[in-house]
Amino acid sequence: MFETLSDRLSGVFTTLRGKGRLSPADIDATAREIRIALLEADVALPVVRTFIAAVKQRANGAEISKALNPAQQVIKIVNEELVAILGGETRRLRFAKTGPTVIMLAGLQGAGKTTLAGKLALWLKGQGHTPLLVACDLQRPNAVTQLKVVGEQAGATVFAPEPGNGVGDPVAVARAGIDFALEKHHDVVVVDTAGRLGVDAELMAQAAAIRDAVDPDETLFVLDAMIGQDAVATAEAFRDGVGFTGVVLTKLDGDARGGAALSVRELTGQPIMFASTGEKLADFDVFHPDRMASRILG
Ligand code: GDP
């Protein structure tokens, strides 16, 4: 991911090398090139505008630095602005003060929610927690089985409706899952929910009903970083329909242009909290804006 953007930006910086000083015309030209690079990477237009305005303002106002040449100064500014649009600081998971911490997962089908449930379970166990996975995706035929598989791989208990009971009521399963966690002393509950191929009202209503039933401490919107421009509309629909407290970017190992990753924080106002970088449960970590920015700048 981000290869085209990285190449483009490094091309921009190369043209600045060897310049003794940047004229306003140089800064304008550089800003234009960065703008094209971001747009080509599918970064949402409002985010590009904010980004470019900040870079220009800072580059024009930059004090003459003895330590940095103009190219280095621009790289520093772009780096800091990238960190800023990615959220600045790492946002850690918030745990409930009493009772189990409830984490609800929401997102489109195929975004990687069920896989993420397994990843979170493994990660939480590594931090000394005793997670319970609750199977509330009763739409996709294999979702419950898949959750059981990832739960087993992570060594975590999975709470699921018994097979053969028809479609089942995800809200009732969610409630029963919380009761089970209380009874068995699981300190974190991860609630997997159903996703559809596209945003639809029924999906949103179901996710909202589960949210109301479990009163989550965190609702994580799971976003496939490969989906490009559609990411913006999807994120906004989930923000308005269900609401979320954080974003998990999945499939960051893919070769998409990465604009979704760069736009979602700024557009939704919610932090990117975790990053998923592969199909294996261990391909997962807390999201660090500064590391992502360094990766983009190569
Ligand atoms: P759900 O419908 O949201 O529950 O999505 P799944 O968890 O079933 O994931 C859909 C597909 O994406 C599966 O084939 C996963 O193995 C794959 N997947 C999930 N996360 C990642 C990731 O970070 N990288 C890659 N390459 N594949 C992933």
Image (cartoon, grey):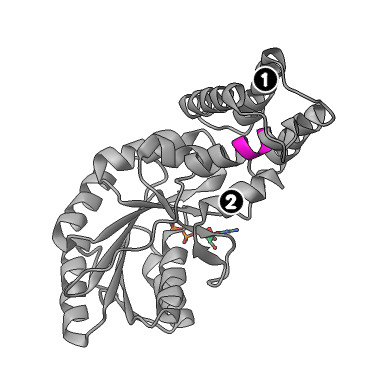
Magenta region includes residue 278? no
Q: Residue at x 72, y 48 (%)?
A: 298
Q: On the image, which quarter does residue 26 sit in? A: top right
At mark 2, the secondary structure is helix
* Cα gap from disc 2 to disc 1, whole angstroms: 25 Å
Which amino acid type is marked by label 1?
A: Ile
In the rendered image, which quarter is residue 101 located in? bottom left
Q: Is residue 161 above or below residue 12?
A: below
Residue 95, image x and y in percent? Answer: 27, 68
Label 1, ligand 1: CB separation under 8 Å: no
Image height check: is 275 above or below 42?
Answer: below
The answer to whether one can see residue 88 in this image is yes
Provide the residue designation for mark 2. 292
Q: Which mark is residue 27?
A: 1
Within-10-Å neighbours for mark 2: few <14, some 14–19, many 20+? some
Q: Residue 183 at what x, y percent from top left?
A: 16, 85
The magenta-colored residue range is 74-78
Which is in the foreground here, disc 2 or disc 1? 1
Horizontally, is 116 left or right of 284 in the view? left
Quadrant assignment, res 256: top right
**What residue do we see at 60% from left, 35% from top?**
77
Residue depicted at x 51% and y 56%: 288
In the rendered image, residue 75 lying in the magenta stretch gets the answer yes
